[in-house]
């Protein structure tokens, strides 16, 4: 099985998308139960400071790397113009 999530913070409070694919022979209900348990855990427990710092660093690094290519710069400008009305 595999699972991943995506957090879209472009508008309002944001949108958390969680997706999972059950491995062959695994019950979807068991996968759904495990995902819901993990979401409840994330809701109720504090994220350790070291893990939070690691994720913040990764977000910044990924954003900078995306802007190192002409394509990445064009994408960032297009997103800024489309979503925020300002290409700067």
Image (cartoon, rainbow, N blue to C red):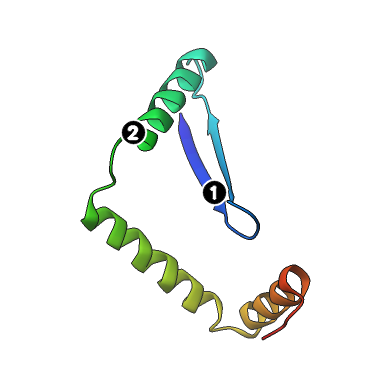
Q: Quadrant of the C terminus?
A: bottom right
8 or 4: nearer the viewer: 8
Dot 1, crowdedness within 10 Å: few (<14), some or many (≥20)? few
**Residue beneath the point at 51% across and 20% down:** 24
From the viewer's perspective, tell me whether residue 67 is left or right of residue 74. Answer: left
Q: Which quadrant of the structure image shows residue 18?
A: top right
**Residue beneath the point at 73% across and 68% down:** 83
Pointer 1 residue: 6
From the viewer's perspective, tell me whether residue 52 is left or right of residue 86. Answer: left
Q: How many marks?
A: 2
Residue 2 position, x and y percent, is 46, 34
Residue 65 position, x and y percent, is 48, 77
**Residue beneath the point at 43% across and 32% down:** 39
Q: Secondary structure at mark 1?
A: strand
Q: Is residue 18 above or below residue 11?
A: above
Q: Is residue 18 above or below residue 70?
A: above
Q: Of the numbered discs in the image, which one, if any, rests on residue 81?
A: none
Q: Secondary structure at mark 2?
A: helix
From the viewer's perspective, tell me whether residue 68 is left or right of residue 84. Answer: left
Pointer 2 residue: 44
Q: How far apart, in angstroms, are the residues tagged by discs 2 and 1?
A: 19 Å
69 or 62: nearer the viewer: 62
55 or 3: nearer the viewer: 55
From the viewer's perspective, tell me whether residue 77 is left or right of residue 63. Answer: right
Q: Which quadrant of the structure image shows residue 43?
A: top left
Between discs 2 and 1, the one toward the N terminus: 1
Dot 2, crowdedness within 10 Å: few (<14), some or many (≥20)? few
**Residue beneath the point at 47% across and 21% down:** 31
Residue 51 position, x and y percent, is 27, 54
58 or 11: nearer the viewer: 11
């Amino acid at each position: 099985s595999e699972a991943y999530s995506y957090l879209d913070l472009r508008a309002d409070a944001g949108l958390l998308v969680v997706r999972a694919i059950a491995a062959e022979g695994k019950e979807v209900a068991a996968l759904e139960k495990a995902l819901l348990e993990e979401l409840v855990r994330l809701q109720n427990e504090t994220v350790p400071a070291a893990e939070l710092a690691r994720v913040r660093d990764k977000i910044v690094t990924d954003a900078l790397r995306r802007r190192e290519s002409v394509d990445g710069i064009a994408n960032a400008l297009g997103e800024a113009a489309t979503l925020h009305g300002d290409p700067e």
